[in-house]
Image (spheres, helix red, strand yellow):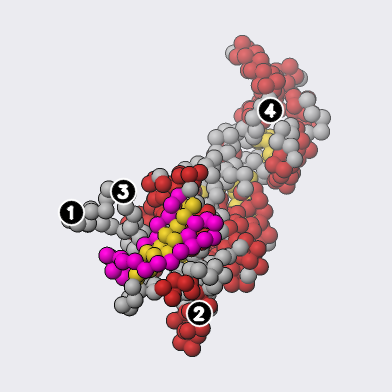
Amino acid sequence: MSEEELTKYICQIALSGAVDFIQKYEDKGDAAAGGIIGHFGLGFYSAFMVSEKVEIITKSYTDAPAVHWSCSDADEYEIELTSRPEGRGTTIVMHIASDEEEYLNAFKLQGILNKYCAFMPIEIFFREVGEENKEEEGAEEKPLNDTTPLWQKPASECTPEEYNAFYKKVFADYRDPLFYIHINADYPLNFKGILYFPNIASEFESLEGQVKLYYNQVFVADNIKEVIPKYMLMLKGVLDCPELPLNVSRSYLQTNSYVSKVSAHIVKKVADKLNALCNTDRENYEKIWEGIKVFVEYACIRDKKFYDRVKDSLLLKLTDDTHVTVKDYLEAAKEKHENTVYYTSDKALQARYISLFEEQGIKVASFDKAVETQFLSALEQHMETVKFVRVDADVASALKSEESTEENEDLVALFRKASQNEQLKVKTEALKSAKTPAILNLDENARRFEDMMRMYNNADMPTSFSKEGETLVLNTTSPLISKLISDLKEQNHEHAEKLAAHIYRLSVISQSRLTAEEMQTFLDESFALLEEI
């Protein structure tokens, strides 16, 4: 700068250089004024927040002599002519106040520069005392910032390795992301960016993502949640939005229509990416599905439009660890259980039920996350005719043989006594498999209500809450049930009661975990039976 420019732009605190810039280029269209941010308004006088004195030595590109400007924090400044051996340019010297000396620490300064200037379009170099002659000694000095960040390049020119390296550098994560989305939105949105789905190791890891907001590569704010829908806050990435002002505020973001459009565009791009992975890279999509499914399912719960976009890419993980889309599962189920998806919430606990279904060629889906109960309800609302039924909630028609059964009142009374529950619903069915003498079913609606109550009201609610929805199904093709019927006919009640009690306890174990008292009773009964063998 010349002395005149220095006086105009530095000595008048309230003067905005950006105003003059706009006026100068207002007739040259948006392209000329598009780079205003980053040239002005970065707050020169913020230097006095940590300095007791600031000096400027500057020389214009004209032949005007160099100027030396100095000012204390008492608002007294001096201007005098000087020399600048380096020629054209500006040097700013900050005399750090004694109580702000932490800003003389090289590590802290580099941290600030890495956060706020990592992608500034002008090269920035950092030199510590004693490194001034490094360049003269032949060492190649590299800028600490990246003037051409990855999001400024066309997606076709970027490799997976570059995307992963950029992610690890920006977010200090040693793991590769599960997938990435390169955004280059044209008019009227006009923004660029790269969004990543992080590799979350466990459900106990922090699920909060981080989206950094830039304006023409100038850092604006960290973790802008208003630009990303709440149900996608696990995303990490960078967005460069030249349509936003540099001094963007939270309240501005919450009410700005441009931000709403950006958010909607991001949702669409995420949905498009999921569909593309499912349709063209199915093997990899299945590998990452377990890492993303909770978030995809939650998004489907919160946003019907998002569900409509990705419904054909929603996968079900089956008990054999393979995956199938919901659409394909229903198509394959038309003959045996049309419009019904059978699922398990605990493969180990419900193993007996699962085996009954799999023996008849019925695939069982695995839902083992708490949010999936709500997801199933949302799918039933969206798909209307489709029902999701847990394997212990219903005896599917495909499990039953054509053999007819008759109600046996003595058998019903026997099991009500064994269960110590006179209200227990007991019915007989002839199942195709004779291996299982009895199964305890719990009505799907009653169980979901119990799950909801546990989640929101009382995590310690006893398992007896939904006893009214229980039904004990006795399998008449089982040799054990046939023996019970024979015992009752022969008036061998003592043996029948012991056998019925044991069968009932086994059916309870296969449906839910016993309480300490129930387990003790079961063990006592088991040992007593062994003594009779």
Query: Toward which corner of the image does residue 101 lie, by quadrant?
Result: top left
- Mark 3, residue position: 129
Q: Which residues are magenta?
A: 71-96
Q: Please report the residue visible at 48 percent of the width from the left and 74 percent of the height from the top.
A: 8
Q: Which mark is residue 504?
A: 4
Which of discs 3 and 4 lies nearer the camera? The answer is 3
Q: Is residue 383 visible?
A: no
Alpha-carbon distance for marks 4 and 2?
87 Å
Reading the image, the residue beneath label 1 is 137
Q: Residue placed at 65% from the left, 33% from the top?
A: 512
Query: Along the polypeptide, which appears first: circle 3 or circle 4?
Result: 3
Element under label 1?
A: loop
Tell whether position 89 is magenta: yes
Give the main secondary structure of the magenta stretch. strand
Q: Nearer the viewer, mark 4 or mark 2?
A: 2
Residue 410 located left or right of residue 147 = right
* Residue type indicated by callout 1: Glu
The location of residue 435, given as percent across then percent down, is 57, 33
State the image coordinates of residue 107 (x, y, percent, origin top left). 39, 45
Determine the CA span between mark 2 and mark 1: 43 Å
Residue 407: x and y in percent read 76, 37
- The amino acid type found where label 2 is placed reads Asp
Labelled disc at residue 20 = 2
Tell me which label, 1 or 3, sits earlier in the chain.
3
The mark that comes first in sequence, 4 or 2, is: 2
